[in-house]
Image (cartoon, rainbow, N blue to C red):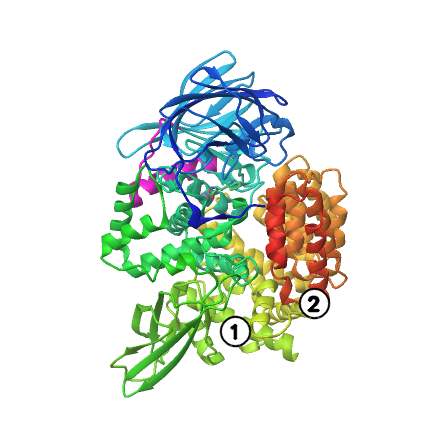
């Protein structure tokens, strides 16, 4: 496959004035008639006229009304064109019913829908399918379906047809079309300038009752973006459509967002609190793209973080405002460490702005999204709230309507703040996670912190330069009072010292508060100091981190030295768990242990080969010790976490249920599942029902509950995804792969549906010791299914290949087995470009 480089960017030779599409729908023979007014682009170098096009049957092409015969290849067509402006026309035929890749125009449960990001529009018609070519679109849809939607505003309709016009110039990746026998949940919103906007969530009949939460989340997002960023919606209508078959979470098509149904449909009976929170965040994310992504888009796909990093940052700010900022920050860091750190520290490591790719779909990664958001968080921390707001205003003013770059983004910050951001820019080009070590010194009232940073080499980048690190620090005196409040130190050198004067005693430092930079902090402070911070730190993140450090150290000693559980930590934690002034959601996070994958990462970093069975055994032993130590406290806490009010998925109630469920999982270790069975039987919402079922599966006492759950929910696809996933995730490692395999034999294992496939195979990969079973059965099963899925859906297959990204950490037997499976995939004739690129990088 061909490699594309950022350095080779050149503008397209023509501008597109407008695009007219007529789409006549038929499952196996949809006709797409295209009319485009092209005019030469004065800012582009001379080039052949080339339009992307894949899997299209060209019926006719014409220039200025005269038929032409372009040269057609599997990638597109070239044609001789006039020197000046001209009208391009083409007719093509496509077969949406045969499109299992879920890219371009495809069918899901009889409904037509599209997914064009990143390069799917070229499967609909011949077009310059690149984000810097922006045009207004007029779309006529012909077909018998009751509902026919596209971008922009509806302009006209009649029996069997509907027309839409989108007045905002956009790249083709934001094009969308939906048609089907759908029903809507309506809503309305009046913008800050008094414009009424019609809102709709379109779903399959039967799902109408699951839209109310999504609608409220949409309105809250619209209001928040007006209040916080001054951004107003810009069309008469905003449509959301729920689709069952979708490769990712959702898509921000202009005025017509398309959602994986799992990311928009919600009801208390069928959705967990975590589902509600995720739905709220994704609706916000897609809505916020209207300004950060759509009105200002990316010049090329290397700039993906320009829209994704910023939009993730904005959606995390939104969630922090809607719920608890502290809990959100801790959750985001857990997620970053679980998904982005392994990527940055393994063979798939790439910069936030990659410099080359073969298949752009492989770069919708945690690095681009989540590390991209962290980079913006650091920028905001460095310049401060006011200058951040100034820079953003300038960005929106200056670049509205542009296809912009990271250089444009940083320039507005430089101009708004007078700062030189040339060193900061390394965050976009340098891959890998910086390691930050720290030493301290105290003499005569002066306290000095000396930091050293270094970033280990990553593929293609042996040498690393120092990066700008905002290090938020607070100092506590020995009584636990804060003597220096949170201060952001700006580190720019490889090694750098910062002094604090006038301290009457040696303080206890609280370093990297709020996880102020995405680094690995290396500080082996004494357990006493960690327990002190666990008890006294005013920074919630560092309070949590101190406890996490103690848990990591305890598990490390258990795994490597055969030590017993650290009872001093368990007792210190008990004080936090008992403190009913603390948010239950925060206490639930405090109770969770590091994941087994995180422990494997820690062991590897310390030069110890991780043994998944030993890691699993240690975490089980530690949890049992916690349960036994707190045997009297746990039922008491369960009682305190009971919610008697009507169900609401708000932060307060969901915090209580989160803590209640963690407590239940500990109690299950003592009572074999009696309390869990009682919770399961009485549950009137999915959070309690699923929490109880998870405990019962872990205890091996699930048969009755599992059957009851299936009987209750067998007709609800999204709930059954949970049923599939939980069995694999919560089963003891020795049975996980066998259980996953058995589930794949069920007739309702609809493996072509990405949600169902991920429910089983994604959960297997998450069951750390189960996936890494010594006999290699987990690896084999997953590889078999990846090979099978690649023939239908390369995108989802390629994304799932990344579960092998840590293969070089394990013992030689496991390494050899994983390598052999990757090689087996790589050797498949006809392997997709997506998967070829992934396995090649994984094996490098
Ligand atoms: N911008 C959207 C990305 C996306 C996507 C990318 C590749 C293939 C399928 C896809 N579906 C959605 C979603 C987002 O970040 O908001
Ligand atoms: Zn996004």
Q: Nearer the viewer, residue 487 or 248?
A: 248
Beta carbon at label 1 within 8 Å of ligand 2: no
In the picture provided, is 772 more to the left or to the right than 492? right
Q: Secondary structure at mark 2?
A: helix
Distance (Cα) linking label 2 and label 1: 21 Å
The residue at 61%/21% (across/down) is 29
Which residue is at a point 53% across and 44% down the rendered structure image? 361
- Identify which residue, 10 or 658, lies in the foreground: 10
Tell me the quarter of the picture where residue 603 sits. Answer: bottom right
For residue 1, above or below residue 479: above
**Crowdedness of circle 2 by 10 Å Cα count: few (<14), some, many (20+)?**
some
> Left or right of 286: which side holds 753?
right
Report which quarter residue 27 is drawn in: top right
Residue 233 part of the magenta-drawn span: yes
Is there any visible trace of residue 209 in the rendered image? no
Residue 390 image point, x, y percent: 24, 50
Q: Which mark is residue 613?
A: 2
Q: Secondary structure at mark 1?
A: helix
Tell me if label 2 and label 1 are in contact, CB under 8 Å: no
- What residue is rendered at 67% in x and 49% in y? 761
Identify whether 4 is placed above or below 581: above
Numbered range of the magenta stretch? 212-237
Question: Image height check: is 286 above or below 610?
Answer: above
Q: Which residue is mark 1?
A: 550
State the image coordinates of residue 102 (x, y, percent, origin top left): 59, 35
Quadrant of residue 757 in the image? top right
């Amino acid at each position: 496959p061909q490699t594309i480089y950022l350095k080779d960017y050149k503008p397209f030779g023509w501008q597109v004035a407008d695009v007219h599409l007529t789409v006549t729908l038929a499952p196996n023979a949809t006709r797409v008639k295209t009319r485009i007014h092209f005019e030469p682009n004065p800012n582009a170098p001379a080039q052949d006229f080339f339009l992307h096009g894949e899997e299209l049957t060209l019926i006719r092409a014409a220039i200025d009304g005269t038929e032409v015969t372009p040269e057609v290849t599997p990638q597109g067509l070239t044609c001789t064109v006039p020197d000046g402006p001209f009208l391009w026309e083409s007719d093509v035929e496509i077969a949406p019913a045969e499109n299992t890749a879920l890219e371009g125009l495809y069918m899901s449960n009889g409904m037509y829908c599209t997914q064009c990001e990143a390069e799917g529009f070229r499967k609909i018609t011949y077009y310059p399918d690149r984000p810097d070519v922006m045009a207004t679109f007029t779309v006529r849809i012909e077909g018998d379906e009751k509902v026919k939607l596209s971008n922009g505003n509806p302009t006209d309709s009649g029996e069997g047809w509907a027309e839409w016009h989108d007045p905002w110039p956009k790249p083709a990746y934001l094009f969308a079309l939906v048609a089907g026998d759908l029903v809507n949940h309506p809503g309305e919103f009046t913008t800050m300038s008094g414009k009424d906007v019609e809102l709709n969530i379109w779903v399959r009949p039967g799902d109408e009752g699951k839209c109310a939460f999504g609608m409220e989340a949409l309105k809250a997002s619209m209001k928040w973006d007006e209040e916080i960023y001054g951004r107003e919606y810009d069309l008469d209508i905003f449509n959301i459509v729920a689709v069952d078959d979708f490769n990712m979470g959702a898509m921000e098509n202009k005025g017509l967002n398309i959602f994986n149904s799992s990311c928009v449909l919600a009801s208390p009976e069928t959705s967990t609190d975590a589902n509600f929170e995720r739905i709220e965040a994704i609706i916000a994310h897609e809505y916020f793209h209207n300004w950060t992504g759509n009105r200002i888009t990316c010049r090329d796909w290397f700039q993906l973080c320009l829209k994704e990093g910023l939009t993730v940052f904005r959606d995390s700010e939104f969630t922090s405002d809607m719920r608890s900022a502290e809990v959100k920050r801790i959750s985001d860091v857990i997620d970053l460490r679980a998904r982005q750190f392994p990527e940055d520290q393994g063979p798939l490591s790439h910069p936030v702005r990659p410099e080359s790719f073969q298949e752009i779909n492989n770069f919708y990664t945690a690095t681009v999204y989540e590390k991209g958001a962290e980079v913006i968080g650091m920028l905001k921390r460095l310049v401060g709230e006011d200058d951040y707001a100034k820079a953003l205003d300038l960005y929106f003013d200056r670049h509205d309507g542009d296809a912009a770059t990271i250089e444009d983004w940083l320039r507005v910050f430089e101009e708004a703040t007078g700062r030189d951001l040339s060193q900061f820019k390394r965050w976009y080009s340098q891959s890998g996670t910086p390691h930050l070590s720290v030493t301290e010194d105290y003499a005569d009232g002066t306290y000095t912190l000396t930091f050293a940073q270094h970033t280990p080499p990553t593929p293609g980048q042996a040498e690393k330069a120092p990066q700008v690190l905002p290090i938020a620090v607070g100092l506590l005196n020995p009584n636990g009072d804060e003597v220096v409040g949170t201060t952001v130190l700006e580190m720019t050198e490889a090694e750098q010292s910062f002094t604090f004067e006038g301290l009457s005693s040696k303080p206890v430092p609280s370093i990297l508060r709020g996880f102020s930079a995405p680094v690995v902090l290396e500080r082996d402070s004494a357990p006493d100091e960690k327990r002190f911070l666990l008890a006294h730190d005013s920074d919630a993140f560092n309070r949590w981190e101190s406890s996490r450090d103690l848990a990591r150290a305890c598990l490390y000693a258990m795994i490597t030295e055969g030590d017993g559980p650290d009872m001093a930590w368990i007792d210190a934690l008990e004080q936090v768990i008992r403190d009913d002034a603390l948010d239950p959601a925060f206490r639930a996070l405090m109770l969770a242990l590091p994941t087994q994958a995180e422990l494997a990462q820690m062991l590897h970093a310390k030069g110890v080969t991780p043994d998944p069975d030993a890691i699993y055994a240690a975490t089980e032993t530690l949890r049992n010790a916690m349960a036994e130590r707190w045997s009297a406290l746990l039922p008491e806490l369960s009682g305190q976490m009971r919610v008697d009010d009507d169900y609401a998925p708000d932060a307060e109630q969901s915090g209580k249920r989160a803590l209640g469920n963690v407590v239940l999982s500990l109690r299950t270790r003592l009572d074999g599942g009696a309390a869990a069975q009682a919770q399961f039987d009485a549950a009137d919402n999915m959070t309690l029902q699923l929490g109880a079922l998870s405990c019962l599966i872990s205890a091996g006492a699930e048969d009755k509950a599992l059957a009851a759950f299936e009987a209750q929910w067998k007709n609800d696809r999204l709930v059954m995804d949970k049923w599939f996933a939980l069995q694999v995730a919560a089963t003891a490692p020795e049975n996980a792969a066998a259980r996953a395999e058995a589930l794949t034999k069920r007739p309702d294992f609809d493996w072509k549906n990405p949600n169902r496939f991920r429910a089983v195979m994604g959960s297997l990969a998450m069951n750390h010791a189960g996936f890494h079973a010594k006999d290699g059965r987990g690896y084999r099963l997953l590889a078999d299914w990846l090979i099978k899925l690649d023939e239908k859906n390369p995108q989802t297959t390629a994304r799932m290949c990344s579960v092998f990204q840590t293969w070089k950490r394990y013992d030689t037997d496991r390494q050899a087995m994983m390598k052999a499976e990757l090689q087996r995939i790589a050797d498949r004739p006809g392997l997709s470009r997506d998967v070829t690129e992934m396995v090649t990088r994984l094996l490098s």
